[in-house]
Image (cartoon, grey):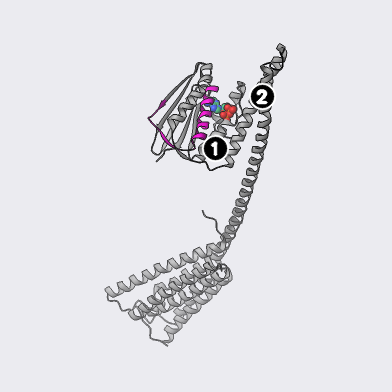
Amino acid sequence: MEIISHDQRIVQRSYWFIKLRWLAIAGLFLMILFALLMNLKVQFFGLFIILAGLIIHNLLSIRLLKKLELENRLGVPVYRHVFYQITVDLIFLTILLYFSGGMENPFILFYSFHIVLGAILLPKKISYWIAVIATFLFLLLGTIEYSEILPSYSLGLFNYSTFNLQYILSLFILFSVTNFVLVYLVSNISDALKKQEQWLFVTNKKLIESNEQLKDKDRIKDEYVSRISHDIKNDLSVIQTNLTVLKKQIPGELTDSQMKFVEIALKRTHQLSDFTSKLLKITRSRLNKTVSKEKFILNDVINRVVEKMKPAADEKNINVSVKLEDTLQAYGDSFSIEEAIMNLVSNSIKYTPDNGKVNIIGSQKANYNEIIVEDTGIGIPKAELNNLFTDFFRASNAKQKKIQGTGLGLSLVYNIIKNNSGFIKVESEENKGSRFYVNIPVAN
Ligand code: ADP
């Protein structure tokens, strides 16, 4: 549901009211046609004048409402406008009733519609005024008819001997009581709804504001993390180079125990470097949501990934099979998509025990390419699948088996695929294996 202010809602409802009047105009037109066809004794001239008057009234109402909206004069001016519309409607209704049988016409019930509409749209006080006007007009109609100041146009529904002062008076009392009770009931319900609407509007506005603030803070955090990771990465690469020089024993020979310490330090530095570069990539992909897209052949990207991952797979004697449909034309940032597929394949190799299998399948569906990366690895516990793509998430079984990781790879994959208008999902069973599905748009 669209959340708009109460004043705007009143404008919307006024347009709805105007639409209702078009329906009433069409109804009246049909009734006149019907009366013409059936040769009924009705004042056609009077009815046509009312029809034309109603059309002009509705056109004027639209114009005025549009003007108020354009000048942004909502609130009280719109209330006044609705009040004016309902009052004119009531006058037209009274004239219409006069020409079509007066108080004996069952359409006198139509007064109530306007009273209900007024109570819905307008503040309570003004709604009571509508009831007063309706009651006055009804009284006027009865008086004209009873006093015969003007000629009356009977429908021939009543026998005039029963249509006496007593009848008119009781009808009038019933009519006025009904009107005021209607205003009381409807405006109470409508007031409660208006309050709720107002509350919803304010709450929603606050929610939108805090959401914007959160987004801002998130962006600042990403910028901050990105800067720090960048700085750490630079220092790390200097440490790494120095440790490598030491390991190669260029400055002088190392004892066995010295070499052990250097190797541990080098291994930890590699891990830290991997962590910071993933952190850097992830924050950058979040900060730059727009990527430069182009047409490319997905087969080339996948084959490159397999080529790069071959040594890691061979080391664990894992068989990597690739089944791709001919020339999969894709659209996106091939560089980051390669990074995403690389992460998936690297995970599959990492989380699959020696002698296992990894399959990569690529095919074209309706308007996207589907790439499946599946393995016969340790799988992911069902209860943890929902958190798989969040930052720093590591499944309990991977931690138990002490397999090294940062918990950032899949988060990066998710961002890359999202920025390339794609989609990723996973199916997995613990100790059986995992299957990742990636959709990437096809090139037109
Ligand atoms: P990392 O592998 O560095 O820990 P990822 O974000 O790439 O980080 O993966 C998050 C977690 O998802 C991993 O720690 C692991 O528990 C689980 N995971 C990812 N890929 C697989 C896979 N192919 N098989 C089993 N578990 C996986």
Q: Residue at x 48, y 73 (%)?
A: 85
User: Residue beneath label 2, please?
Assistant: 241
Residue extending farthest bottom? 149
Q: Earlier in the sequence, mark 2 or mark 1?
A: 2
- The residue segment tinted magenta is 323-351
Label 1: element kind: helix
Q: Name, please, the residue furthest toward the top.
A: 256
Residue 442: x and y, percent?
42, 38
Residue 184 shows up from this direction: yes
In the image, is residue 199 part of the stretch drawn in magenta? no
Mark 1 residue type: Asn
Residue nearer the viewer, 215 or 297: 297
Q: Nearer the viewer, residue 374 or 87?
A: 374
Answer whether residue 380 is visible to the viewer in this image.
no
The disc label shown at residue 415, or none = 1
Taking the spot 48% from the left edge, 79% from the top edge, the residue there is 137
- Does 122 sit above or below residue 370? below
Nearer the observer, disc 2 or disc 1? Answer: 2
- Horizontally, is 169 left or right of 5 in the view? left
Dividing the picture into quadrants, the one containing residue 399 is top right
Determine the secondary structure under disc 2. Answer: helix
Quadrant housing residue 300? top left
On whether ligand 1 comes within 8 Å of the CB at mark 1, the answer is no
The residue at the point 60 percent across, 30 percent down is: 407
Distance between the Cα atoms at labels 2 and 1? 31 Å
x and y percentages locating residue 189 in the rendered image:
55, 62
